[in-house]
Amino acid sequence: MSAPTTPAAALDDVEEGVVLRPKFDAAGLVTCVTTDAQSGDVLMVAFMNDEALKKTIDSGEAWYFSRSRGRLWRKGESSGHVQRVLEIRVDCDQDAVWIKVEQGGGAACHTGRKSCFYRRVDRDAEGAPLLSPVDAERLFDPAKVYR
């Protein structure tokens, strides 16, 4: 069964209605925030087009649209670290999607880390922004996984 992604309607219908009406941007994409269903940690932020959203809903696995590659991709298709979707939410005006997943293999980031958000913005002694690693342990070696 295909997911009911239909064109946006009246504001009240979008904000309070029960029909999924994603508001894709000019490029046909919607932002997707992906979190670990158990811990609540943000794993990644990616984009979905209509097809990726439909495949995610229909398959129960996370699908995204890669802007750099210009194509659809299933999370884990190269690494084997598939994301099993437990819940999908949309924000108030349906221009962002939030999916809660079980992360296969423990790592969501292509760098081998649990999360793509493994650096915190701090300040150096002069007050300039500086990136500091947090939760930056590599769970796999990208050079061995992405050949």
Image (spheres, helix red, strand yellow):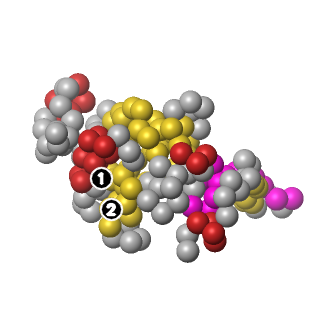
Tell me which residue sits at (46%, 36%) in the image: 100
Tell me which residue sits at (25%, 30%) in the image: 15
Q: Which residue is mark 2?
A: 72
SS for callout 1: helix
Q: CA distance from mark 2 to mark 1?
A: 7 Å
Q: Report the residue that reaches farthest toward the bottom.
A: 147
Tell me which residue sits at (35%, 40%) in the image: 60
Tell me the kind of residue under disc 2: Leu
The answer to whether residue 49 is magenta is no
Q: Position of residue 97 (x, y in %)?
A: 36, 41
Whether label 2 touches label 1, CB < 8 Å = yes
Which residues fall within the magenta stretch? 110-125
SS for callout 2: strand
Tell me which residue sits at (28%, 48%) in the image: 55
**Image side of residue 62 versus residue 3, left or right:** right
Camera sees residue 6 = yes
